[in-house]
Image (cartoon, rainbow, N blue to C red):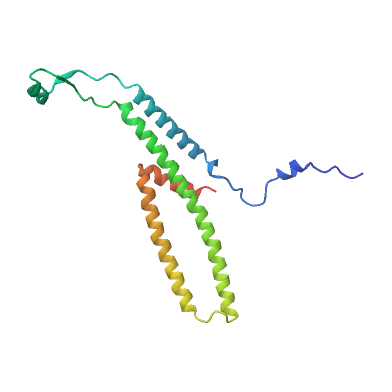
């Protein structure tokens, strides 16, 4: 009597050979940063909607001189600790999330660039071996020009990304963890 085979669903659940690849949202640190960002934004909105009444008023010298009477103007009050910490919490979390995304994308870009470089080197080797490639200096100039373009574009992207990441420490930590995640 033949052995009963496993249903297709069980065969599909078997782990593949090699290291398992994880998606963008598989990091617990990323979820913690998203939670911190959401809490910071919510906290900031709550504090903005529930601001206390303005403090005591004092007459303004300029208004008193023009009107001839005491016209009160509100005294600016110092923001509370909560009002200073809430936006900083949101910026910290968002910087980490943006940094993580940049690191995650850099890791994928490095893999793709390595594969494309291997293909290009293999193609150049084969073209030279079969005497199809006559002038390797032209290819070398093209490779140098492409490398310079990549360097300038990556520098511009770095400046752009750092301009939107207000917390540099959290952003750099996010980039570092994003690059190291599989």
**Image quadrant where residue 72 sits:** top left
**Count of numbered badges drawn on the protein:** 0
Residue drawn at 41 percent across, 39 percent down: 94
* Residue 80 vertical placement versus 117 (above, below): above
Extreme residue toward the right, this view: 1
**Image quadrant where residue 127 sits:** bottom right
* Residue 44 vertical placement versus 142 (above, below): above
What percent of the width, then of the height, locates residue 167? 36, 42
Residue drawn at 38 percent across, 38 percent down: 92
Judged left or right of residue 104, residue 63 is left
Q: Nearer the viewer, residue 139 or 92?
A: 139
* Residue 160 vertical placement versus 77 (above, below): below
Residue drawn at 50 percent across, 57 percent down: 110
Extreme residue toward the front, this view: 67
Judged left or right of residue 17, residue 97 is left
What percent of the width, then of the height, locates residue 178? 48, 47
Q: Which of 177 and 55 is in front in this view?
A: 55
Judged left or right of residue 94, residue 70 is left
Q: Which of 89 and 176 is in front in this view?
A: 89
Q: Nearer the viewer, residue 1 or 142?
A: 142
What percent of the width, then of the height, locates residue 137? 46, 78
* Residue 116 vertical placement versus 60 (above, below): below
Residue drawn at 37 percent across, 56 percent down: 156
């Amino acid at each position: 009597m033949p052995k009963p085979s496993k249903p297709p669903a069980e065969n599909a659940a078997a782990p593949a050979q090699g290291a398992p690849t994880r998606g963008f949202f598989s990091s617990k640190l990323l979820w913690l940063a998203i939670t911190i960002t959401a809490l910071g934004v919510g906290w900031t909105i709550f504090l903005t909607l529930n601001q206390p009444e303005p403090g005591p008023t004092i007459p303004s010298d300029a208004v008193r001189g023009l009107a001839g009477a005491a016209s009160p103007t509100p005294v600016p009050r110092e923001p509370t600790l909560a009002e200073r910490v809430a936006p900083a919490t949101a910026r910290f979390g968002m910087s980490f999330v943006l940094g993580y995304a940049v690191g995650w994308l850099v890791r994928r870009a490095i893999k793709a660039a390595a594969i494309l470089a291997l293909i290009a080197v293999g193609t150049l080797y084969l073209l030279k071996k079969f005497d199809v490639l006559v002038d390797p200096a032209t290819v070398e100039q093209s490779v140098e020009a492409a490398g310079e373009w990549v360097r300038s574009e990556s520098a511009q992207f770095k400046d752009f990304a750092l301009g939107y990441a207000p917390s540099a420490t959290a952003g750099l930590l996010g980039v570092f963890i994003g690059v190291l995640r599989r």
